Amino acid sequence: MSEATTHSVGPELASGLKKKRFQLQSRLGRSDRSPLAIWFWELDRVLLGLIMTLVAIGLIAIAAASPVAAIKHSSDTVTLNSLHYFYRQLMWVAVGVPVMLLVSMAPKETARRFAIIAAIVAFILLFLVPIMGNTVNGAKRWIGYGFATIQPGEFLKPFYAVSLAWLLSLRAKDESLPVIPLSFVLTGIVALLLMMQPNLGQTIIFCGIWFTLMMLSGLSARFIAAISIGGVGGIIGAYFLYPVATQRINSWLFGGDEFDQVMLAHKALTGGGLLGTGPGLGTEKFKLPEAHTDYIFSVIGEEFGLLACAAIALVYVAIIVRVFLRLLDEEDNFIILAVAGITAQIGGQALINMAVNLQLFPSKGMTLPLISYGGSSFIALSLGLGLLLAFTRRNPYLDRSQYVQTWTPNKQVTT
């Protein structure tokens, strides 16, 4: 190659490399206005990081608890691999995380419509559970067949929170609308269907979501106090009239099968001390009835220590705090209620699960969000968290810009 050819190719090559470098730097940069880049910069990446932290912790915890479940669910003819449930959960994570990210990309109006339609579908499926549901361990909570079996109550929770938020947000536009009585009736129907399964834990979560949104919807303190008194009365009534509640509370107070489970969970939780026995070295976990689901928090305590349990609790608290910091200057009443409802669901479920493992609450058969094993639970949570990320998306610089224009009632433009 001649010297002239070399000199002519060099600048072209340098120019091409410079152009490629600029394109790479612009990808997902401030100057990139593609839908993916806009989503990336509007997304609360801190919240997403906290969620993914719990997902990673869940996989580690299920790997520790999987041998227990594999032994209990093996038979004389079928022997499950010790990591059978870990591999299955890994599959659910591979499905659920992309679903969460996909839902988080939806515009807020689209996310709201999706949640309302999905709530109607899940509500219908919940109606069908007593008719054509599957019974597992004495409870009829599932519907479907084989791999396609789902738990409608799990899927209804986040969609119910968003739908209820939309219903209550209509009250701000027209106070004459009977949205409060309607929300009470809908919640009562859901609670009745869940108690028929029986599923006392899910019933408490739905009632907790409803109560949280009632407090945030602008009702008077007198009305909130009346609801609180009614809630206490409902618990007392359930104790005397609902056999499942009677059995669970009596076992917690006076001993019994459920109490023995909680006692074993507490023993496993505290058996590892502050730092734990080490991964795979726990022995008390083999005495737990559902080590990979209801009592996975105790497995973490035994093998990774009480400090690890405290760290997990702090991650849940950090998620709640991060969400409410995100809402400090939010003006859309629907967004405030929807985000608060989904957060109340996740926070309430985590609190009850940890309280049961600590012997502070009767056994409820409730999973630890994002950490316990479960296909329906993880996919439903992924959908709910996708909605949460979609509703908390915002341009952090839009409100600060001096070029943002607002219209006053007399149609004058202000900056």
Image (cartoon, grey):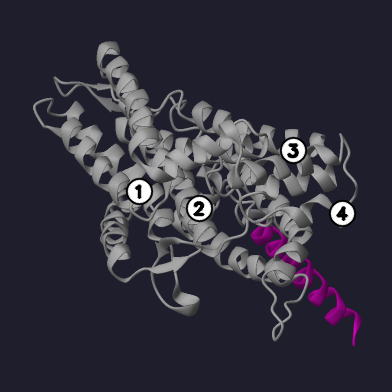
Q: Main secondary structure of the magenta part?
A: helix
* Amino acid identity at mark 1: Met
Q: Is residue 389 above or below residue 254?
A: below
* Amino acid identity at mark 2: Leu
Closer to the N terminus: mark 4 or mark 2? 4
* Amino acid identity at mark 4: Pro
**SS at badge 4:** loop
Residue in the foreground of this view, choosing between 153 and 254:
254
Q: Residue at left 63%, top 38%?
A: 354
Give coordinates of residue 18: x percent, y percent: 73, 61
Question: Is 345 on the left or on the right of 265, as rendered?
Answer: left
Q: Which residue is mark 3?
A: 309
Residue in the foreground of this view, choosing between 257 and 238:
257
> How many labels sit on residues?
4
Q: Residue at left 48%, top 60%?
A: 102
Q: Which residue is mark 2?
A: 381
Q: Which mark is residue 279?
A: 4
